[in-house]
Structure formats: structure tokens, C-alpha cells
Amino acid sequence: MGRFRGSITKQSRREGINLAETEKVQKYLDKRPYGPGQHGQRRKGRPSDYSVRLREKQKLARLYGMGEKQFRNLFEEASNVPGVTGTVFLQLLERRLDNVVFRMGFASTRRQARQFVGHGHIFVNGKKVDIPSYRVKIGDEISVGEGSRSMGFIQENMEAQKRRRVSPWVEMDADNFKGTFARLPAREDLALPINENFIIEYYSR
């Protein structure tokens, strides 16, 4: 699965979930709750067990914007860590720097967060990090570089962030364009429309 660069709205309609986690995409899904294209509303037969598990895996990979090889490697790592594999896997996904930048509100989508990280706008503990998959640790401080804080997109995102509920596992100092990854999210913290057990079954087949 290569990096998807097409319409996130069409992809969200295909998967049946809001992959961008934005109000704009959600409104579009509410208006057109069926797949894209001329056959999007065609009634289909009952999907096979394999198809259900494959789609669930693709949903989660696309939600976090990851390719198949990277996604599977992370799953295999989670499988070798003590604890509930599904929860550990989701926690590893949440610790990606691009995702943390999104959760903190510096970016409006994970795709935008990946761009901000790649272009050198994001710092971890005062040091520039331009690797979207960088794994954030508990206690790490994530901030926007001083030279990037005047960017229009970032200014708009931070104003919007002040009006919305912050993820409970991060602590924010929006006025100073920084936040802290305070703890690992519990499964109940993550309102993801995903059944991770299907993904475990998919890779265990």
C-alpha cells in the first residue's frame, strides 16, 4: 500500500469512516453515506470473513496514513510486547510524531501533520525532528519551531485547538505552541471506529 495522495473524502466514503477526523469530511459522509463512484450505492452481498478483516486492517492503516510494510512491522512489534496486543498496537500508532502533532492540534489532519514534520517545523525536546514515524516517549515536549509559529495554517490550527477538547493523554500550552505527551492512551480513550481484534485475526491467519 503506497502513500495515498488522492481525495481523503472519497477514501473515507469507501471505508465508511472519517479518515481525516475533520468536521468537513464528516458532513460530507453524513450527506453521502455510501461508497464513491457510480456504483457506490449498489447493494452488495454479505462480505466474507476474510474481506471484513482485510477492510478493518485497511481502515486503520489509512487512518494513520501508513503503508502496508510499515504497518505490518509495527503490528509484529506489538505482538512481541507484553500486554493486550490490540491495545499495544494502537498505542504504538498513537506515539508516532505525526499523530501526536495532530492530536495536539498543531495540524488539522494527520496528512498535514506529516508535512509539518517533514518540512522541519516540529521540535521534540528542543531538537528538530523531521521523521513522521519518530516514536514519542512519555514526558517528551513537542513544539512548533519559533520561525514557524507565524505560519497562517499553524496560527489557524492553534486558534481552533483552543476551542476543542484536547486528547486526555497530552497536556497543552497552546499560547506557547507546545505540549507534552503525558501518558499512553488507554483503549477507552481512543474513540476509533475500529475492531482491532479483526486485525489481529487477519495477521494471524
Image: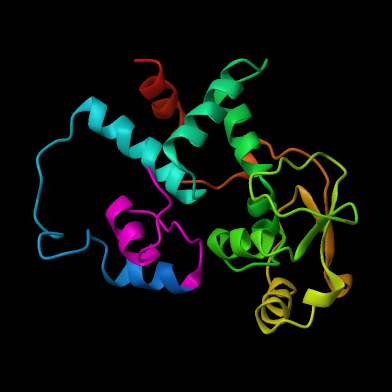
Q: Residue at x 83, y 70 (%)?
A: 174
Secondary structure mostly taken by the magenta-highlighted segment of the chain: loop
- Regarding residue 172, the answer to whether it shows in the image is no
In the rendered view, does 156 fall on the left or right side of 35? right
The colour scheme used to paint the residues is rainbow
Q: Is residue 101 above or below residue 147?
A: above
Q: Is residue 86 above or below residue 185?
A: above
The count of marks equals: 0
Q: Residue at x 36, y 24 (%)?
A: 202
Residue 7 inside the magenta-drawn segment: yes
Q: Which residues are magenta?
A: 1-23
Relative depth, front residue between 56 and 64:
64
Residue 133 in view of the camera: yes
Across and down, in percent, residue 62 comes to 43, 48
Image vertical order of residue 125 relative to residue 24, above or below = above
Where does residue 63 sit, x and y in percent of width and height? 47, 50
Quadrant that contains the N terminus: top left
Image check: 60 left or right of 97? Answer: left
Query: As drawn, is 199 to the left or to the right of 43?
Result: right
Q: Say which residue appears at 39% left-offset and 63% top-offset.
A: 8
Counting from the top left corner in percent of width and height, residue 153 is at 65, 79
Residue appearing at x 78%, y 83% in the figure = 150
Residue 205 locus on image (x, y percent): 34, 15
Q: Per the image, is 115 magenta?
A: no
Give the quarter of the image for residue 10: bottom left
